[in-house]
């Protein structure tokens, strides 16, 4: 997520991901385990991995990128990039998309389980003629939209039963949570804090409406 945001800011017109599925032509010894560090966005059982869901979040990106001030911490950092979506000429709403990624800078050498969640402090200045219609946050991390975590909790079944597949597919789904409680409005500035675990990502959608 962070890489895509940075390369887009540098003017990249297209990026690709290798590969779509764990089943691909170059495999000489096909894996039979549902999760085996394969390259695909989908497992051999067609279960959506977190990377697949990250692309699903990216599909909600707006057409225009907005400048964002990023302050990088020393141990664990939140990277934020933003886009703007506008409706048609008759629409009175605008959607602000904030993509938050938690990552460890290259200079650090820490174990993931010892790394704290990053806290993205978000400040959005809104003019007096605009109101916040709604706000949601959608997460991808070890506890959200993660079929791999669910597979481990099932004691790593192999092969998967039909019931296992249903559980994993359900666990991989994205869930947009109401984020109204995360934000406060004061003197035209919308302020909020979004916590993201190491190597997690989140999409904050703020829908704005003209008064």
Image (cartoon, rainbow, N blue to C red):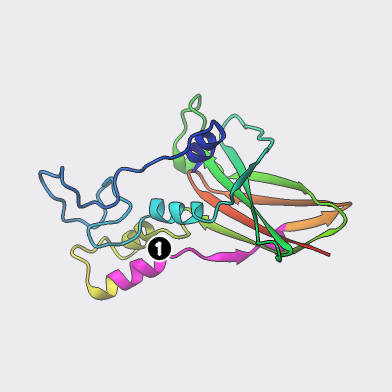
Q: Which quarter of the figure has residue 53?
A: bottom left
Numbered disc total = 1
In the rendered image, the residue lying farthest to the left is 28
In the rendered image, the residue lying farthest to the top is 107
Magenta-highlighted residues: 165-182
In terms of secondary structure, where does tag 1 sit? loop
> x%, y% of residue 92?
74, 64
**Circle 1 residue:** 172
Q: Determine whether, in the image, residue 112 is placed left or right of residue 74.
A: left
> x%, y% of residue 195?
61, 50
Looking at the figure, which quarter contains the C terminus? bottom right
Does 116 sit above or below residue 150?
A: above
Q: Is residue 103 magenta?
A: no
Does 148 sit above or below residue 105?
A: below
In the rendered image, the residue lying farthest to the bottom is 163
Q: Residue at x 16, y 51 (%)?
A: 31
Q: Residue at x 24, y 62 (%)?
A: 45
Q: Determine whether, in the image, residue 50 is placed left or right of residue 5.
A: left
Q: Determine whether, in the image, residue 113 is placed left or right of residue 23.
A: right
């Amino acid at each position: 997520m962070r890489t895509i945001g940075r390369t887009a800011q540098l003017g990249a017109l297209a990026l690709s991901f290798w590969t779509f599925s764990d089943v691909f032509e170059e495999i000489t010894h096909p894996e039979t385990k549902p999760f085996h560090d394969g390259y695909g966005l989908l497992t051999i059982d067609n279960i959506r991995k977190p990377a697949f869901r990250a692309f699903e979040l990216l599909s909600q990106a707006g057409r225009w990128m907005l400048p964002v001030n990023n302050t990088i911490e020393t141990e664990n950092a939140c990277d934020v990039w933003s886009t703007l979506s506008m409706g048609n000429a008759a629409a009175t709403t605008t959607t602000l998309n904030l993509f938050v990624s938690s990552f460890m800078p290259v200079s650090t050498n820490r174990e993931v389980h010892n790394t704290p969640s990053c806290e993205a402090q978000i400040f959005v200045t809104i003019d007096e003629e605009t109101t916040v219609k709604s706000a949601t946050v959608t997460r991808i991390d070890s506890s959200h939209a993660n079929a791999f975590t669910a597979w481990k909790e099932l004691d790593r079944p192999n092969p998967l039963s039909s019931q296992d597949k249903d559980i994993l597919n359900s666990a991989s789904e994205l869930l947009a949570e109401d984020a109204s409680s995360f934000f406060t409005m004061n003197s035209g500035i919308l302020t909020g804090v979004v916590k993201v675990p190491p190597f997690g990502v989140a999409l904050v959608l703020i829908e704005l409406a003209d008064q």
